[in-house]
């Protein structure tokens, strides 16, 4: 009889959460302290506003970061890691060590390879390709 191994559901959920695109970058930056949305956006190359907003909401929903509203004029919003989020520091440091030893310097995909928006859905990308392939047609705004 073969030994059957089961995947721990908590481990799987944690890896899926932290392993989502851009999530590690957001957490890594916030390990250095509070940041505003624009600072995060500027520090993470190629992330769209939609994707950053989505990741911040997910991490706030998981209690990994806190959204802090500073009552000034104008109102300022900052993000910082919670205790739960800061507890990821050692795990991310180990991933960083692994990346230094085994990772490549090549990006996973080239932005020049696809002129279409990264955050577009497949039907949107098909529509954009279709519009760009038909000369004389104006793209609707």
Image (cartoon, helix red, strand yellow):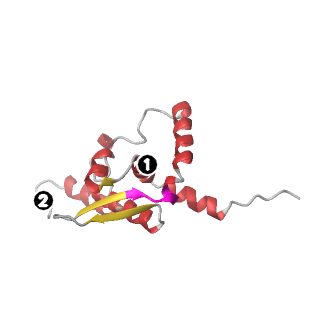
Q: Nearer the viewer, mark 2 or mark 1?
A: 1
Location of the C terminus (image quadrant): bottom left
Location of the N terminus (image quadrant): bottom right
Give the mark nearest the N terminus, 2 or 1.
1
Horizontal and vertical percent position of residue 131? 20, 58
Horizontal and vertical percent position of residue 105? 44, 32
Horizontal and vertical percent position of residue 39? 28, 50
Residue 21 counted in the magenta span: no
Q: Splitting the image into 4 quarters, where does residue 98 fall? A: top right
Circle 2 Cα neighbour tier, 10 Å, few/some/many (<14 / 14–19 / ≥20): few
Residues in magenta, as a range:
80-85
Q: Which residue is mark 1?
A: 31
Q: CA distance from mark 2 to mark 1?
A: 48 Å
Residue that appears at 64% across and 64% down:
9
Q: Is residue 19 visible?
A: no
Q: Is residue 38 visible?
A: yes
Q: Is residue 115 left or right of residue 30?
A: left
Circle 1 Cα neighbour tier, 10 Å, few/some/many (<14 / 14–19 / ≥20): some
Q: Which residue is mark 2?
A: 137
Up/down of 62 relative to 35, above or below: below
Q: Is residue 57 left or right of residue 138?
A: right
Report helix, strand or loop for mark 1: loop
Up/down of 111 relative to 134, above or below: above
Which residue is more in the foreground, 100 or 73?
73
Residue that appears at 52% across and 48% down:
89
Report helix, strand or loop for mark 2: loop
Residue that appears at 35% across and 40% down:
110
Residue 81 counted in the magenta span: yes
């Amino acid at each position: 009889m073969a030994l059957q191994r089961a995947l721990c559901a908590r481990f799987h959920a944690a890896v899926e959460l932290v392993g989502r695109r851009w999530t590690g970058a957001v957490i890594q930056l916030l390990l250095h302290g509070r940041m505003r949305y624009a600072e995060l956006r500027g520090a993470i190359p190629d992330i769209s506003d939609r994707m950053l907003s989505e990741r911040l909401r997910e991490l706030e929903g998981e209690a990994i970061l806190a959204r802090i509203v500073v009552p000034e004029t104008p109102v300022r919003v900052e993000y910082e890691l919670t205790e739960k989020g800061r507890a990821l520091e050692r795990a991310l440091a180990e991933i960083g060590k692994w990346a230094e030893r085994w990772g490549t310097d090549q990006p996973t995909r080239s932005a020049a390879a696809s002129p279409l928006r990264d955050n577009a859905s497949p039907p949107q990308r098909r529509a954009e390709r279709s519009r760009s392939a038909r000369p004389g047609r104006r793209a609707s705004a």
